[in-house]
Image: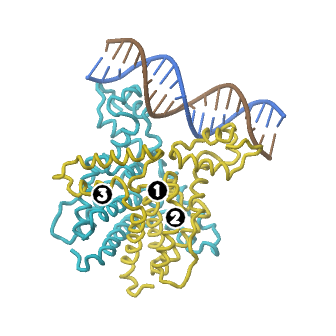
Chain colours: A cyan, B yellow, C blue, D brown
Amino acid sequence: MAAQRRLNRDELIATALAVSDAEGLDAVTIRRVAQQHDVTPMALYRHFEDKDGLLAALAEKLVADAMVPEPDDRPWHAQTHDVLAGILTALRPHPNATVLLLTRMLDSEAGLALTERVLALLADAGMSVEEGADTACQVLNSLVTLVVSEPGRSDGADSEAHDAEVRATRARLLSLSPRRYPHVVAAADAFADCASAEMYYRRGVDLIVAGLRGVGSAAQPVAG
Amino acid sequence: MAAQRRLNRDELIATALAVSDAEGLDAVTIRRVAQQHDVTPMALYRHFEDKDGLLAALAEKLVADAMVPEPDDRPWHAQTHDVLAGILTALRPHPNATVLLLTRMLDSEAGLALTERVLALLADAGMSVEEGADTACQVLNSLVTLVVSEPGRSDGADSEAHDAEVRATRARLLSLSPRRYPHVVAAADAFADCASAEMYYRRGVDLIVAGLRGVGSAAQPVAG
DNA sequence: ACCTGAACACCGTTCAAGT
DNA sequence: ACCTGAACACCGTTCAAGT
């Protein structure tokens, strides 16, 4: 990285994100990020309280990038669909870092704004405050895991190593007993890699929204 | 731990799980587990290829403990509900370790058996092989995150520290601007801690099953 | 105000021995 | 066959200085 006179917090976060994208979240260390900026590890402690502070900032950057559509007059479930799709668009480029959000959604302004938006939609759907809170957590975490566990994803591998891993997973699943694991063997290709990532994510969002409509239908038969 | 003549793999895993439960997953180190058995760190390498092998064994133990009901003649969604509830019962006592399953569900016999069971139910629901694979991943991961992100959970804290954390979260959310975050402020109690864990998990499973019924209803109007 | 340098208490893992 | 011991290349973080 460029030799700079003064260390910049945003650039440190950008470096951390780049390292995470390229080599996995475990490669994000205080010493590594410092080295990229030609600086002593201790220099980072001026911008982050400790390593967890750096990771929290990383998590915040992910959700801050989410472009979420403004409220409109469509039914709550149509708006929810688009909000969730918008969040996914922000997370998908950074699958290695996304797992950080599993425990940090309420720890940043951006995460709180997203949560507020989802809570409002769930209130429109007729949910109580408590049901909305539990459900909002679950919905947001489902988006996170959708990205974290996308079939065919590898932590910090070049495309050659990635392909090798996909082939290895496929071969391993295909080598299982078709008597004991008939469905798993039949699904080996789908587990090893996504035929279509777009389809995978569309199904994911559809499943969540269908769930929301399903649990709401008893309390509020004529929705939105 | 007991001074033993010979190291036992299952006891090592049990120790790792105990450390994880008591002090969090980060406290599970090769050196720590070795020390509990009064043994040199390198002694563990006879039973696990490396640290990832130890963690994989830990993940396997979690899902191996799941008591999943046998198939019966009820509709697929009723059986799915009970299978998911059974998995939750196995995961809930070990929230710190549960996150390991997010990327390891297909890496153990027990995880494969669980996946096979869910795939069969989704096939009954009328899903294609590919849709079933994507959906099974999402459903199982939702259970994992339900446990990992249960409101009021703290990593490795005694009950005093836990209560302090719950109060701190609640106070932080209550101190937010009620103009900008009206729904979040109203839900501060629910985000800080579960009023009822049973209710939280019941809602979680219901949301998943409702989603499955919802997405299936187009392909197979008369389900089960 | 901002950064350095040395030090400390940890990691996972290697290699070569021990019994 | 099973375990030890020393060593290596890493961590996060402290403290006391430097400019």
- Marks 2/3 in contact by CB < 8 Å: the verdict is no
Kindly state the secondary structure of the residue where label 1 is placed: loop
Residue at point 45% right, 80% down?
B125
* Quadrant the C terminus of chain A occupies: bottom left
Residue at point 28% right, 59% down?
A86
The amino acid type of the residue labelled 2 equals Thr
Marks 2/3: CA distance?
Answer: 31 Å
Sequence-wise, the earlier of marks 3 and 1 is 3
Discs 3 and 1 share one subunit: yes
Q: Front-most of B111 and A166?
A: B111
| A166 sits to left or right of A210 | right
Q: Which mark is residue A153?
A: 1
Residue A133: image location, x then y, percent? 31, 60
Query: Is residue B97 placed above or below A195 in the rendered structure?
Result: above
Residue at point 70% right, 43% down?
B2
> Between tags 1 and 2, which lies in front?
2
> Between tags 3 and 1, which lies in front?
3
Q: Which residue is mark 2?
A: B89
Q: Chain of mark 3?
A: A
The amino acid type of the residue labelled 3 equals Ile
Discs 2 and 3 share one subunit: no
Q: Which residue is mark 3?
A: A87
Question: Tag 3: Cα neighbours inside 10 Å, few (<14), some, or many (≥20)?
Answer: many
Q: Chain of mark 1?
A: A
